[in-house]
């Protein structure tokens, strides 16, 4: 619960990225990918940067993983989600956790929009990354970033996916 409130507080953060942090983004992304990143609202840019920095601190340097850290949530820009939508999504998820998957299956209209974005932004983000020419591993990590990874699955992609989810969950 405390984490959810912290997440919501982070969602209110809207100070723009500093020159140094932009330089960090540009070191990881191609110019076309950086344009995608720039579409994210400031709070999501900071979230993505925290994911990147956490991975780097933990010793991860795989380029596709670092790109996915910055781009994993770009699909959220596909639909306009307001702060009220975010509050609804957090409260809805807390009060009726079993219903969010059903609500997320809709067409993105009305009050269910934040749940649709929450469920479908990985697929939308993967499509956007494909359109700017990202590499297949980056695209796969974006597309699968909310997927449950089975313990038995231990390919390179799954190991990177676990690292991404680990950093995403605490950022
Ligand atoms: Fe996400
Ligand atoms: Fe995220």
Image (spheres, rainbow, N blue to C red):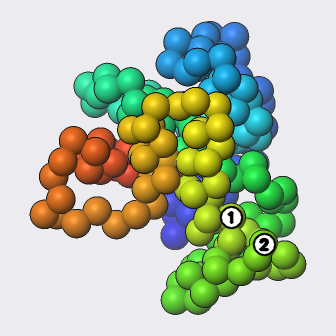
Q: Can residue 83 be seen in this view?
A: no
Q: In this view, does 164 lie to the left or right of 33?
A: left
Mark nearer the N terminus (1 vs 2): 2
Circle 1 residues within 10 Å: few <14, some 14–19, many ≥20: many
Quadrant in the picture for residue 26: top right
Q: In this view, does 20 lie to the left or right of 83?
A: left
Instruction: Give the residue at x 13% y 63%.
Output: 152
The residue carrying mark 2 is 108
Quadrant in the picture for residue 18: top right
Quadrant in the picture for residue 112: bottom right
Query: Which secondary structure lies at badge 1?
Result: helix
The front one of 112 and 166 is 112
The residue carrying mark 1 is 117
Instruction: Give the residue at x 56% y 81%.
Output: 101
Residue 72 x/y as whole percent: 54, 44
State how far apart marks 1 and 2 are (Cα).
7 Å
Q: Is residue 100 left or right of residue 148?
A: right
Instruction: Give the residue at x 63% y 27%.
Output: 33
Kindly identify which numbered label has been placed on residue 159. none
Rendered position, 60 above or below 11? above
């Amino acid at each position: 619960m405390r984490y959810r409130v912290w997440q919501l507080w982070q969602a209110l953060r809207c100070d723009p990225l500093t020159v140094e942090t932009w330089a960090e983004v540009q070191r990881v992304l191609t110019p076309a990918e950086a344009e995608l990143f720039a579409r994210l609202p400031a709070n999501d840019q900071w979230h993505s940067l925290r994911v990147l920095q956490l991975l780097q601190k933990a010793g991860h340097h795989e380029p596709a993983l670092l790109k996915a850290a910055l781009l994993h949530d770009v699909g959220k820009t596909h639909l306009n989600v307001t702060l009220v939508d975010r509050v609804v999504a957090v409260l809805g998820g807390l009060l009726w956790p079993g219903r969010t998957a059903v609500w997320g299956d809709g067409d993105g209209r009305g009050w269910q929009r934040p749940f649709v974005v929450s469920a479908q932004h990985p697929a939308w983000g993967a499509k956007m990354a494909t359109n700017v020419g990202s590499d297949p591993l980056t695209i796969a990590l974006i597309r699968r970033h909310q997927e449950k990874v089975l313990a038995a699955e231990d390919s390179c992609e799954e190991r990177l996916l676990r690292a991404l989810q680990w950093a995403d969950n605490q950022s």
